[in-house]
């Protein structure tokens, strides 16, 4: 028989363990509660911080980390780039994209262009600008990002993004496999047919028409030339190099430009005159010079062995005046199937290089004339400025006005052609 003392001790011990278990259970519950509370608080705090950062972040550009993202995420990222604004990359990212700048595509006074690749395999061209005390690199950087960064058109080279810090200025473009047009016009081998060159001219004109007439703010390129027309793997053309470009309101008839812009041989004559208003028609003049080089598949200016100047645009005008453009196209080696288009292109080029900016057609009209279906009016004599440079050569034509873009029954530059079948039906009806 157990004693009363041992029974009381057992009860005390059981009560103690029960009390201890209850206390520990309460402590565990409190601890879990506090952990959950801290976790929820941190989660809410992170969400609030993200919202605040999104609210105060600069709207134009995005700094995106792409080191640890998978392929689908990068694909989404690139699609966003195509739709919206250029992305701000870091110098470390560009070093990775270009494999430490191992492949050079080209170089010039502006800097060096390197070939690169996004993590998803998309090829890019990285232009690293040379910095100088003259601030030309900064001006070019701001011109390119401020113009091409605002636009999207299938005939304009796409700007994916940029890098700017205390050490470097760089621009990241889509990669154009076949390079610039000049090597196909002036190279020893004629790698592409003339018909493809005609398509390249139309595509380039469409890109320029978008810059001049379809953007919210008109963009003047100032440096249209074969070296700034790039072609992709299918020889699809895109206008590139907006380092001299400038924005202006579409209702402004002209803008003030300080100093000469562009490349000699392609720049419009109004740049040679002091304080003369510059309009978007200076790009039209440059494009006309490009058309001459496409027709002749040669540089416009050659120096003969006797050191006499052979200037092809003047030769085209002389042949046009004599109604001998077809003979000229034969001499240029253009096949019979392409000669009609070459004759049209020659006449369009003569319209584009008129002395008066107002007499030059807008690029949308140039596109229409290049595509055919309209009869091109005989162009007036250009290049008066070569003989007597002065303000008189740049005055608008007497029969024209400053607004020559409105389409009437007969345009200043062309008139609608009546299709052959329609003419035949008219004759049958009247007989």
Image: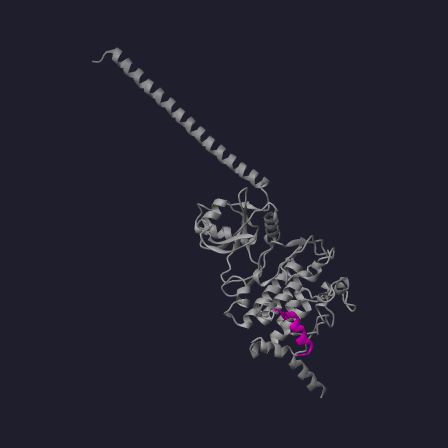
- Along the line of sight, the residue nearer the viewer: 62 or 362: 362
Instruction: Say if the magenta span includes residue 318.
Output: yes
In the image, residue 255 lies at what x, y percent?
Answer: 71, 54
Quarter of the image for residue 8 reads: top left
Number of marks present in the image shown: 0
In this view of the protein, can residue 236 be seen by the observer? no
In the image, residue 101 lies at what x, y percent?
Answer: 46, 50
Quarter of the image for residue 345 reads: bottom right
Tell me how the rendering is colored. one colour
- Along the line of sight, the residue nearer the viewer: 191 or 32: 191
Up the image or down, 316 lies above or below 145; here it is: below
Instruction: Say if the magenta span includes residue 268.
Output: no
Residue found farthest to the right: 398
Which residue shows up at 64% across the image and 67% down it?
A: 367
Residue found farthest to the front: 306
- In the rendered image, the quadrant that contains the C terminus is bottom right
Q: Is residue 413 left or right of residue 166?
A: right
- In the rendered image, the quadrant that contains the N terminus is top left
- Along the line of sight, the residue nearer the viewer: 326 or 199: 326
Up the image or down, 413 lies above or below 216; here it is: below
Up the image or down, 213 lies above or below 346; here it is: above
Residue found farthest to the left: 1
Up the image or down, 281 lies above or below 320; here it is: above
What segment is highlighted magenta in the picture? 307-323
Quarter of the image for residue 236 reads: bottom right
In this view of the protein, can residue 199 be seen by the observer? yes
Q: Is residue 311 left or right of residue 14?
A: right
């Amino acid at each position: 028989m157990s004693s009363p003392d041992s029974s009381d001790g057992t009860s005390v011990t059981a009560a103690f363990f029960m009390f201890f278990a209850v206390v520990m259970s309460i402590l565990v519950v409190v601890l879990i509660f506090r952990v959950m509370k801290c976790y929820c608080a941190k989660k809410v705090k992170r969400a609030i911080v993200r919202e605040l950062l999104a609210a105060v972040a600069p709207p134009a550009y995005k700094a995106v980390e792409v080191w640890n993202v998978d392929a689908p995420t990068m694909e989404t990222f690139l699609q966003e780039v195509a739709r919206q604004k250029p992305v701000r990359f870091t110098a470390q990212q560009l070093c990775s994209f270009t494999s430490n700048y191992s492949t050079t595509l080209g170089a010039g006074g502006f800097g060096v262009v390197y070939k690169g690749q996004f993590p998803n395999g998309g090829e890019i061209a990285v232009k690293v600008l040379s910095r100088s005390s003259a601030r030309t690199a900064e001006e070019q950087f701001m011109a390119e990002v401020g113009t091409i960064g605002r636009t999207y058109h299938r005939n304009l080279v796409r700007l994916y993004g940029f890098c700017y810090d205390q050490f470097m200025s760089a621009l990241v473009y889509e990669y154009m496999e076949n390079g610039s047009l000049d090597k196909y016009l002036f190279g020893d081998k004629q790698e592409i047919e003339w018909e493809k060159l005609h398509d390249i001219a139309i595509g380039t004109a469409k890109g320029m028409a978008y810059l001049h007439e379809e953007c919210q703010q008109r963009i003047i390129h100032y440096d249209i030339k074969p070296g700034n027309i790039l072609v992709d793997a299918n020889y699809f053309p895109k206008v590139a190099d907006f380092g001299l470009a400038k924005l202006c309101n579409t209702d402004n008839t002209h803008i003030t430009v300080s100093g000469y812009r562009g490349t000699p041989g392609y720049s419009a004559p109004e740049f040679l005159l002091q304080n003369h208003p510059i309009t978007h028609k200076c790009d039209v003049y440059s494009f006309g010079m490009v058309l001459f080089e496409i027709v002749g598949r040669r540089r416009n200016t050659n120096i003969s062995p006797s050191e006499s100047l052979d200037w092809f645009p003047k030769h085209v005008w002389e042949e046009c005046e004599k109604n001998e453009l077809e003979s000229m196209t034969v001499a240029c080696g253009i096949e019979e199937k392409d000669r009609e288009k070459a004759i049209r292109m020659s006449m369009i080029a003569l319209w584009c290089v008129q002395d008066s900016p107002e007499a030059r057609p807008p690029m949308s009209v140039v596109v229409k004339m290049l595509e055919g279906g309209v009869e091109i009016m005989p162009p007036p004599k250009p290049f008066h400025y070569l003989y007597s440079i002065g303000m008189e050569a740049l005055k608008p034509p007497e029969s024209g006005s400053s607004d020559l873009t409105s389409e009437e029954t007969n345009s200043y530059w062309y008139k609608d052609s009546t299709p052959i079948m329609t003419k035949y039906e008219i004759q049958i009806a009247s007989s």
